[in-house]
C-alpha cells in the first residue's frame, strides 16, 4: 500500500480517536438513566476513561506500530464491554464497577493510539506541520461527529449495536494506520534543551492541568446540563456537546491566523479571560439554545489554549522530560475535574452550581499567567500547529 493511503488511514485514526474520546459525555445521561447512577457515579465513569488515557499516554510503547495494535485491541475490548453492559440492562454497583474497568481499558487504548499517531505522522520533518495540523483537524471532526452519532443511535434504538460496530472499526483501522517508514522504533535525537526553572515549570504544569480539567468538565457534562436545565430531550441534548467541539475546532483554526504573532503571555491572558467569561456564562443558560451558544463560545476561547501553553513551555527552554510531564498533567486534570464536578453536583443537588468549577479553574489560569508568566527575551512565539493528544 502506498504511503499516501497509509496517511489517509492515519487521518481516519485521528477521527476515530476523536469519536472515542468524546463519546462518553453525550452518552452520560442515557447511562445514568439506564443504570440508575447519580452524578457522583457518572463523574467516576468520566474519570475512569481519562485516567486510562493518561496512563496510555505516559506509558506508550516505544515502537509505534505496536502501540497502535495495543491501542486498537484495548479500545475494541473496552468498547465491546460497554456495548454488552448497555445491552444487559442490569443495574447495581457491579455494573458501575465493570463500566469503570471497561472505560479505563478503552482509555488506555485511546491514549496509546493518539500518542503513536502524533509521533508517527510527525516523524518525517518534511511536511510535518501540515500533516499534524490536518490530523488534529480530523480529531476535532470526530469530536463533533460523536454527539450526533449518539443522538442518531438513541433515536433508532441501536446504541449497543453502534458501540459494537465502533469496536470493530477500531480493529479494522488502527493496526494499519501508520506508514511503514513511520513504524520504526523512536530515536532519542534532537538538540538538548536548557531545563525550565522549577517554579515556572510547575506553573505551566498547573496551567495544563486546569486547561484539561476545564475542557473535560464542559465536554463531559454539558449534555446532561442541557437535558436538566435546558429542558432538551434525550435525543437533542447531545448536540450541545457538538456545539462545544465546533467551537474548539473553529477556535483552533482561527487562532492559527489571529494569534500567530501575539506574544504567548498576552495570548494566554486573552484566552483564559475569554474562556472564563464564556464558561461562567454557561452556568446561567436557561434553554438548549442558550446553553449551546455558551458551550460554543467556551470552545472558541478554550480550544487554542493548549497550543499556546505548549508554545510557552518550549519557548522557555523546557527539557523533553519537562515538556512531557506538562502534557501529562493535562490528562490528570481531565481525570480529576469531571469527577470532582460530579461529587459537587451530588452534594449540592445542583449541576448548575457544580458547573461553576470550570469557570473557577479558568480564573485560576488567568491569575497564574498574570503573576508568574512573562514573555521570554528571545523566542519564536508563534503558535505551533499542534493539538492535545485525547
Image (spheres, rainbow, N blue to C red):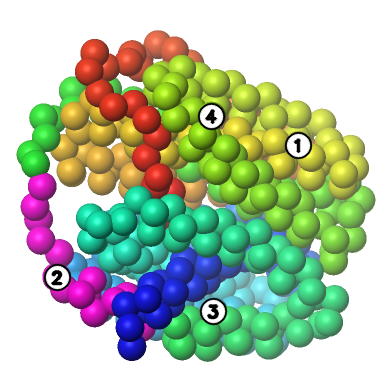
Q: Which mark is residue 79?
A: 3
State the image coordinates of residue 372 (x, y, percent, origin top left): 35, 14
- Of tags 2 and 3, the one toward the viewer is 2
Q: Are marks 4 and 2 in contact (CB under 8 Å)?
A: no
Which residue carries the number 1 mark? 294
Contact between marks 1 and 4 (CB within 8 A): the answer is: no
The numbered mark, 3 or 1, whose residue comes first in the sequence reads 3
Find the magenta span and give its range. Answer: 174-190
Q: Which residue is mark 4?
A: 258
Q: Is residue 386 left or right of residue 88?
A: left
Give the CA separation, mark 3 to mark 1.
31 Å
Q: Dot 1 lies on which element?
A: helix
Q: Is residue 315 left or right of residue 109?
A: left
> Who comes first in sequence, dot 3 or dot 4?
3
Rounded to the nearest whole Å, what is the CA distance between mark 2 and mark 3? 28 Å
Residue 204 drawn at (x, y percent)? 34, 30
Residue 181, magenta (yes or no): yes
- Identify the residue shown where x is 19% and y is 29%: 317
The answer to which of marks 1 and 2 sits earlier in the sequence is: 2
How busy is the neighbourhood of tag 1: few (under 14 within 10 Å), some, or many (20 plus)? many
- Report how far apart the C-alphas of labels 4 and 2 lie in the structure: 37 Å
Dot 2: element: loop
Kindly state the secondary structure of the residue where label 3 is placed.
helix
Provide the residue designation for mark 2. 185
Amino acid at each position: 500500500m502506498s504511503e499516501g493511503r497509509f496517511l489517509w488511514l492515519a487521518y481516519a485514526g485521528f477521527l476515530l480517536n476523536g469519536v472515542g474520546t468524546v463519546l462518553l459525555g453525550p452518552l452520560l445521561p442515557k447511562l445514568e438513566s439506564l443504570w440508575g447512577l447519580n452524578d457522583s457515579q457518572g463523574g467516576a465513569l468520566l474519570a475512569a476513561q481519562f485516567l486510562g488515557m493518561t496512563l496510555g499516554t505516559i506509558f506508550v510503547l516505544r515502537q509505534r506500530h505496536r502501540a497502535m495494535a495495543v491501542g486498537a485491541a484495548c479500545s475494541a475490548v473496552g468498547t465491546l464491554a460497554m456495548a454488552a453492559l448497555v445491552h444487559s440492562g442490569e443495574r447495581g454497583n457491579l455494573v458501575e464497577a465493570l463500566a469503570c474497568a471497561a472505560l479505563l481499558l478503552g482509555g488506555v487504548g485511546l491514549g496509546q493510539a493518539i500518542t503513536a499517531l502524533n509521533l508517527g505522522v510527525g516523524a518525517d520533518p518534511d511536511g510535518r506541520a501540515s500533516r499534524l495540523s490536518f490530523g488534529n483537524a480530523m480529531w476535532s471532526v470526530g469530536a463533533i461527529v460523536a454527539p450526533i452519532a449518539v443522538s442518531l443511535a438513541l433515536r433508532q434504538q441501536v446504541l449497543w449495536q453502534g458501540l459494537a460496530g465502533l469496536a470493530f472499526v477500531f480493529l479494522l483501522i488502527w493496526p494499519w494506520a501508520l506508514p511503514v517508514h513511520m513504524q520504526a522504533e523512536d530515536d532519542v535525537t534532537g538538540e538538548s534543551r536548557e531545563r525550565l526553572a522549577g517554579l515556572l515549570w510547575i506553573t505551566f504544569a498547573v496551567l495544563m492541568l486546569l486547561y484539561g480539567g476545564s475542557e473535560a468538565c464542559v465536554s463531559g457534562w454539558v449534555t446532561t446540563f442541557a437535558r436538566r436545565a435546558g429542558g432538551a430531550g434525550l435525543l437533542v441534548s447531545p448536540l450541545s456537546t457538538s456545539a462545544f467541539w465546533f467551537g474548539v475546532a473553529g477556535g483552533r483554526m482561527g487562532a492559527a491566523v489571529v494569534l500567530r504573532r501575539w506574544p504567548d503571555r498576552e495570548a494566554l491572558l486573552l484566552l483564559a479571560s475569554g474562556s472564563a467569561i464564556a464558561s461562567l456564562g454557561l452556568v446561567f443558560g436557561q434553554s438548549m439554545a442558550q446553553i449551546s451558544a455558551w458551550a460554543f463560545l467556551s470552545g472558541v476561547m478554550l480550544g487554542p489554549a493548549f497550543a499556546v501553553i505548549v508554545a510557552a513551555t518550549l519557548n522557555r527552554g523546557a527539557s523533553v522530560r519537562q515538556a512531557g510531564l506538562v502534557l501529562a498533567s493535562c490528562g490528570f486534570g481531565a481525570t480529576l475535574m469531571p469527577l470532582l464536578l460530579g461529587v459537587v453536583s451530588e452534594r449540592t443537588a445542583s449541576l448548575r452550581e457544580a458547573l461553576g468549577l470550570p469557570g473557577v479553574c479558568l480564573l485560576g489560569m488567568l491569575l497564574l499567567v498574570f503573576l508568574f508568566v512573562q514573555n521570554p527575551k528571545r523566542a519564536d512565539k508563534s503558535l505551533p500547529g499542534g493539538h492535545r493528544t485525547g
